[in-house]
Image (cartoon, rainbow, N blue to C red):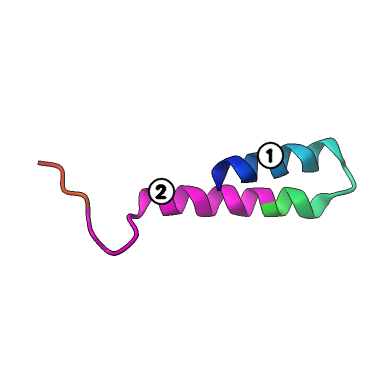
Amino acid sequence: MITLGIILLIVGLLVASLKLLITIGIVLIVVGLILNLIPIGGTRRRVW
């Protein structure tokens, strides 16, 4: 998801008329980072 966001961001920057791709790319990167930091299922990773 983060990779897809970066690809969309780069394509959006290369094609200046596609501002929507830049927005979608940023959203995908942010959501991907949040999903990586917060474990899915509510189980917390315990570091002993």
Residue that mark 1 sits on: 7
Check if residue 32 falls in the magenta segment: yes
Is residue 6 left or right of 17 when viewed as pictured? left
Residue 27 pos. (x, y %): 61, 54
Q: 6 above or below 21? A: above
Which secondary structure is most common in the magenta stretch? helix
Mark 1, secondary structure of its residue: helix
In the displayed orientation, state which residue is furthest to the bottom. 42
Q: Which of the pair 25/40 is nearer the observer?
A: 40
Residue 31 pos. (x, y %): 52, 54
Is residue 9 left or right of 34 when viewed as pictured? right
Residue 32 pos. (x, y %): 50, 50
Q: Crowding at label 2, few (<14), some or many (≥20) Cα neighbours within 10 Å?
A: few
Q: Amino acid at mark 2?
A: Asn
Marks 1 and 2, the one that precedes in the sequence: 1
Q: Amino acid at mark 1?
A: Ile
Looking at the rendered image, the quarter that the C terminus falls into is top left
Residue at 27%, 64% in the rendered image: 42
Residue at 32%, 55% in the rendered image: 39
Residue at 63%, 45% in the rendered image: 5
Q: 28 above or below 47? A: below
Q: Which region of the structure is painted magenta?
A: 25-44
The label number, if any, that marks residue 36 in the structure image: 2
Q: Quadrant of residue 4?
A: top right
Is residue 5 left or right of 17 when viewed as pictured? left
Check if residue 12 falls in the magenta segment: no
